[in-house]
Amino acid sequence: MPHLPPTLAATLSGRTPTLWLNPRLESAAALAALPVGEPEVTAARDRLARCAPLLARLFPELEASGGLIESPLLAVPALQHALCPRGRLLIKADHALPVAGSIKARGGIHEVLEFAETLALREGWIVETDERTRLAEPTIREQFSRYTVAVGSTGNLGLAIGIMAAALGFKAVVHMSADAKPWKKDRLRSRGVTVVEHEGQYGEAVAAGRAEADADPYAYFVDDEHSLPLLTGYAVAAGRLAAQLDAAAIEVDAAHPLFVYLPCGVGGAPAGVALGLKYVFGDAVHVFFAEPVASPCMLVQLASGGLDPISVYDIGLDNVTEADGLAVGAASLLAAELMAPLLAGVFTVPDDDLFRDVYRLHDEEQLDIEPSAAAAFAGPRWLQDNDAGRAWLAEHGLAGKMDNATHILWTTGGSFVPAAEHARFQARGKALLAR
C-alpha cells in the first residue's frame, strides 16, 4: 500500500489543518504530456455553445442568457478586508450557476449533452448539420426514454446529471451516499429522477451505480472518478473566467499573478477547472485545492507520490464532515494524474471554519453558500500568514508581486439550499465567531 511521510500522516490523522505544497509541481510545459489536451476542451466548449439554444428551450432560467450556463465574477470588498488585505480578492460564484446550482453544472450538463448528441447521431435521429433543439422534439424524447442515465453522487453532481437527463426525456437514476443531504434527494425526486439511497459512503454509491449500469445495455453511467467528458466540461470555465477578467481590466501575467482556490471532493471538477486555467494562463496561475480535515483524499493521493490508490481511511480518518460535497474517501486517479505536475498545493480546513466563513460571507457580502463552498476561503491566509506559504511564495519569485496579485475563491454550491438550512449554517457560524 502507498504511504505518506510519517510527519504528514500524523498531522493529517490528527485532523490538524495543514498546507501541503506539491514537490512535483512543474511549469505549464507539462501540459504537453497530459492525456487531456486543448482540443478536447475546445470540443466541450463548442458542444455547449452548439447546444445553448436547446438548453434555453429546456430551462426557462436560461432564456435571458441564450442557454449559456455561467456564473458571475464578484468583487467582495468587505470580505477582502478580512481575508486578503493585499492584492485583489474576487469570488467566482459557481454557487449561483443556473439549472444545477453548483460547479457541477458545466461538466454534468456537458456529459449528458455529449451522450444525447452522440446517441442521436449514431441512431440517425439527427444529422450533424441539424440544430440541436431537435433533441427536444417529442419523437426524439420518446427514443431517449428507452435509455437510462445514471450517476453516483454525494449530491451536486447528481443534481446536474439528474436534472439534465430528465429534461431530455431519459430515465435518470442517481445513486446517493449516506452523507447526501435530504433536500438534494427531494429536489431530484421533484424533477422525476429516481434516487437510490445507499447506507455506505461516496465510493460505495458510485460502485453500485456503475455495476447496475454495466448490466443494462440501455444504460449510460456518468463516472465521476474516470470521466473525460465531465472533466472537459468543467475546464470550459477557464476561458469564460479569462473573458470576465478581461472585461474587468484585470491583468494576469508574470507580474500580476493569479491565485485560484478550489474546494475538492473526488477531484474531477477542480481538476478540470485547474487544467483549463493552466491552458489559458500558463505559469501565471497558481491553483490550490481545499479539503476538509476529515476527507483530504486528493492531498493523500498526491502526497503518496504515485497513482496506487490510497484513501483517507488508510491513515485513520473517518471521512465524516458537514461538507457533504467534499465527503470523499479516495480521489479520482485521473484527476490525481492530471494534477500531479500542475497543482501548487492542497490545504485542509476544519468544519467549524467552514461555518465561520459561510456566516462571514452572508453577513459581509449578503451571499449564501453551502459549507463545502467555503473551503477555499482559507487559501489567501495560508499563503500570506503562514511560514510555509510565505516561503513558497519567495521560492517561486512571487513574494514581491502580491500587491499586484488577484485571488479567486471558487464558491462551488449553495443557491438551491433551502432557507431553513441556510439559517442553520449561519446560526452555527455566528455562534462560532462569537467564541
Image (spheres, helix red, strand yellow):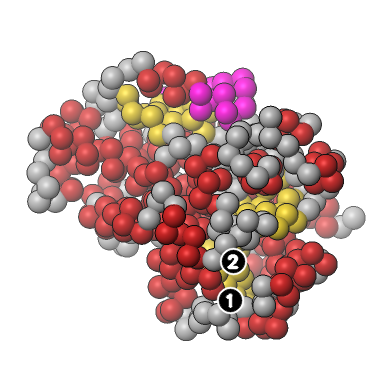
Label 2 belongs to which residue? 286
Dot 1 alpha-carbon crowd within 10 angstroms: few under 14, some 14 to 19, many 20 or more: many
Residue 198 painted magenta? yes
The answer to which of 306 and 413 lies nearer the viewer is 306
Among all residues in the image, which is located at the extreme top? 215
Q: Earlier in the sequence, mark 2 or mark 1?
A: 1
Rendered position, 4 above or below 388: above
Position of the C terminus, as image quadrant, is: bottom right
Q: Amino acid at mark 2?
A: His
Residue designated by label 1? 257
Amino acid type, label 1: Pro
Image coords of residue 29 (percent x, y):
48, 65
Q: Is residue 12 left or right of residue 105?
A: right
Q: Give the image quarter of residue 139.
A: top left
Contact check, label 2 and label 1, Cβ < 8 Å: yes
- Determine the residue positioned at 45% across, 37% down: 226
SS category of the residue bearing label 2:
strand
Q: Position of residue 112 (x, y in %)?
A: 33, 40
* Residue 87 in view in this figure: no
User: Which quarter of the figure has residue 160?
Assistant: top left
Compared across the picture, whether 131 is left or right of 220 comes to left
Spot occupied by residue 407 in the image (x, y as percentages of width and height): 61, 71
Q: Which span of residues is magenta-colored? A: 194-207
Q: Which mark is residue 223?
A: none
At numbered mark 1, what does the secondary structure look like: helix, strand or loop? loop
The stretch drawn in magenta includes residue 12: no
Q: Is residue 195 above or below residue 243?
A: above
Q: Is residue 299 above or below residue 123?
A: below
